[in-house]
Amino acid sequence: MELLDILEHDKKEMMPESYKSLSTEEMEQRVREIKEKFGTKLYIPGHHYQKDEVVQFSDVTGDSLQLAQAAAANKEAEYIVFCGVHFMAETADMLTTESQKVLLPDMRAGCSMADMADIDQTDRAWGKLQNLFGDTILPLTYVNSTAAIKAFVGKNGGATVTSSNAKKMLQWAFTQKERILFLPDQHLGRNTAFDLGIPLDKMAIWNPITNELEFNGNVEDIIVILWKGHCSVHENFTVANIEHLRKTEPDMNIIVHPECSREVVEHSDFAGSTKYIIDMIEAAEPGTKWAIGTEMNLVNRLIQQNQDKEIVSLNPYMCPCLTMNRIDLPHLLWALESIEKGEVTNQIIVPEHITKDAVLALDRMLANV
């Protein structure tokens, strides 16, 4: 959904002011009552980056891959209230049945990275890249992308990837074509390709603003084309953050998400998906020290859940992801009460022609993990 569409939608379905005057206790009690009333007809997936006030009511928590699989497996729920961001709710709608309704409690919960690749830019890029390289490129897109981008990838033989399975999916992609176009996060693409042994000097950047390839050298040497997009949260972790900790806390383990820059990943001790980070922290020895380079809601939750370890954010001035943080208890209650009243609000519906091709991309991923 484009930003103007989201704003227009908000004009029509803004949360009533009355929800802001309710006490936390009142809201929590109402959410519990509605969950009990609807039972298995109601399903609430919650992403790891969500606020605790929302996660406490989630029926399943996970990263993008886990939630995509959970959505695909759930055939019983009539209503799926997705506590995440817009592209995740789109994925849930595409992987569930026509009779199931997917709701996003706050339509402003988007993803700045997903917005960095729109379908018009992608079509223009594909035309120029086909002219340059011929039929040698397979497109892959991070699941942090719009349904339209997923559909483009599916239509052109590619697949979606998550940070959990990016390496496996790139390996699969290279059995299909000799070059990869990786959308929309350049950092995950670069870090994954580098881990597979592809040199940095064989990776190019596609700039969607200038509609040009950024590369110094012979274009025939290019193996991976990285879309010039990024996560605004993970790009704020820096080598300077790491150097400071190396001097002040030399026994601190540094673990980061692969949406961080290549330099940050290279200077860290460990790098991996959200699930990888959680598993590493939970399995770590008591008394060990960890600096984590990922979203603050998750870091704070890991601090609370692992008090036998010393855990800090790699960047002490980091704030939670603005758009991930949109969904709060009032919006969750509003969504649930709309279901109870039979007046479903903020339903996510992906058009059938987009769903058809996007599901091809999603299915290729799910078949390989």
Image: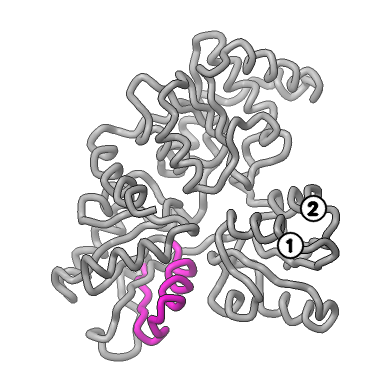
* Residue type for callout 1: Ala
Q: Vertically, is 90 above or below 242?
A: above
Q: Secondary structure at mark 1?
A: loop
Residue 194 magenta-highlighted = yes
Q: Is residue 5 above or below residue 243?
A: above
Q: Residue at x 67, y 36 (%)?
A: 55
Query: Which quarter of the image is occupied by the N terminus?
Result: top left
Q: Earlier in the sequence, mark 2 or mark 1?
A: 1
Which colour assignment does the render follow?
Answer: one colour
Residue that numbered label 1 is attached to: 284
Q: Position of residue 238 (x, y in %)?
A: 66, 74
Q: Which residues are magenta?
A: 185-207
Asked if disc 2 and disc 1 are in contact, CB closer than 8 Å, the reply is yes
Which residue is found at the position 44% from the left and 58% from the top?
165
Q: CA distance from mark 2 to mark 1?
A: 9 Å
Which residue lies at the image location 81% right of the left edge and 21% below the top edge? 25
Q: Which residue is mark 2?
A: 306
Q: Position of residue 126 (x, y in %)?
A: 23, 63
Residue 151 position, x and y percent, is: 28, 47
Say what amino acid the circle numbered 2 marks: Asn
